[in-house]
Image (tube, grey):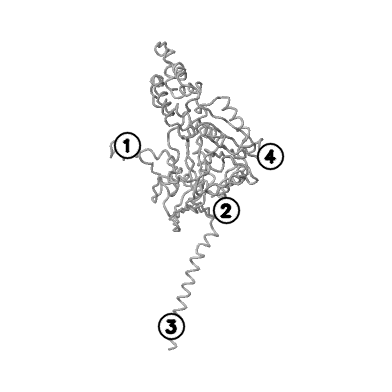
Amino acid sequence: MNKTVEKVFYFSSLAVGSWVAKRLLDEYADLPLQLLCSTIEVHSYDEAYNYLLYWLMKQKFDADKNRLMAITSLTSGQGGWFGEVDKNNDAPEENELEVQADAEYKASLANTRPLLWAPSVGTHWFWYRGRYLALTREMDEHRQTVYTRTEKLRITCFGRDPAILKELMQDARVAFSQKEKGRTVIYRGMKSMFDGELAWKRSTSRPARPLSTVILDEGVKMAFLHDIQHYLHPSTMRWYSDRGIPYRRGYMFYGPPGTGKSSLAFAAAGFLGLNVYMVNLNSRQLTEDALTQLFLTLPRRCLVLLEDIDANEVTGSRKPGAEHRIGKHGISLSSLLNIIDGVAAQEGRVLIMTTNHHEHLDPALVRPGRVDYKLEFQLASRELCAAMFRNIFQVHAETEVDAYAQGDESTKEGSAAELAKEFAEKIPPLTFSPAEIQGYLLRYRESPQDAVAGTESWIETSLAEKASNHEPDGKEPEGDASESTEDEDEDKDDNENANKEPSP
């Protein structure tokens, strides 16, 4: 009997001891490694993740690795806005071209994103500045109200000094920023897939729009650019600080739809090297706290664009005695005003608000200090129509100038300058928006002569349509002369959190 008890006690102690040893091993097994190594982690819901992954692919990380992940976007389940990551990936393999006909192969590639090769899940060793570093890629799945998947990249080096890892991350940041050189990056206030909170998410990146393509009175355009450049100069910030003035500046672009308000904002951002931050004030998920947090997390130097500010119900003129008004989604006028220029409002940013009906806005929103510079956009004048014609048919103009120099009499009569003047004289001034003029000219982009010949017919049809619609207060899509027709919103699935992009 005693021996049986001893055996039971022995095996029980062994089981308990094994369980304790296992728990200690699970908990502290990597402790010696932590004491000997340095580590930096980045998560897929932070932009630093894209810095590092982009840098790894630029280093041809797949050249000597046999465990790879094929992807079409740097982000993990957060939308594909990095299709242009590495142009070298667009080139087909030679052996693939031997299998398929060239035309068929190129046609199939045109409808798909290029393949990018990234490190697969697990640990990979690589050489950086004379030292071996370890890269570990892990995947985390979250099953709460909705299924989400996030990833984590961890770089590790031997030694207690993480300086080499910080240098790598800085190199990755520089490489990523160089990729954006000459481009305008657009961020939107969107719901985060990680925690469900609204945050600034990169929406798209596009080539910076040349200011010359924004058809506007040169004096007006240059005065605006001079003002914004003066505001962003480092000495101006010191001047504001020395006098205790909040370092903020607001601009109001107002005028009929399609006159180029948003286009000038984007062109100015590209000219000044600023990223654009946009938020839809009518989003159902936008609350006062969320909007405040978005503005507090703005970078110090950026351009905030609030399009069609008059479309929000709380920004309209208040009736006498109505001091407090709250919109359907919980944002009040007072909270919006405090976010724009309150004590806790972000400094250093450029705020541009656009509106089709500035006369409908509450005076408190447009008073000096909140709106410091107003710029009116008008329907197309004859001078603007001529400038738009020359801009659309500039290739033809160059060809005709060469022919003119060689004495081609037929070209003299139909030169671009003469055609532009003839076209402009046919257009009734201040009747059509630049977007409407552009839409018409694009129909005949290969034939300026046909564009001039069909002008009267188009005017007659357009005026008849305007008369039949008879909706002077109707909202038209915001656009501008020379605006690209490409769809810039690559996050269609999150329409509630995305502000609309300008389109012609």
**Looking at the picture, how far across and down is residue 500, in whole percent?**
47, 39
Circle 2: residue type: Asp
**Looking at the picture, how far across and down is residue 199, in whole percent?**
52, 48
**Relative to the observer, which residue lies in front, 407 or 102?**
407
Secondary structure category for the residue under label 3: helix
Q: Residue at x 32, y 36 (%)?
A: 107
**Relative to the observer, which residue lies in front, 222 or 481?**
481
Secondary structure category for the residue under label 1: helix
Distance of mark 1 from mark 2, alpha carbons? 51 Å
Between tags 1 and 2, which lies in front?
1
**Looking at the picture, how far across and down is residue 237, in whole percent?**
66, 38
Q: Is residue 275 visible?
A: no
Determine which residue is flagged by label 1. 107
Circle 4: residue type: Ile
Between tags 1 and 4, which lies in front?
4
View extreme (right): residue:
243
Circle 3: residue type: Lys
View extreme (front): residue:
320
Q: Which mark is residue 245?
A: 4
Bin the neighbour count of mark 1 within 10 Å (Cα to Cα): few under 14, some 14-19, many 20 and up. few
Distance of mark 4 from mark 2, alpha carbons? 43 Å
Bin the neighbour count of mark 2 within 10 Å (Cα to Cα): few under 14, some 14-19, many 20 and up. few
Between tags 3 and 4, which lies in front?
4
Q: Is residue 296 visible?
A: yes
As drawn, 61 above or below 456: below
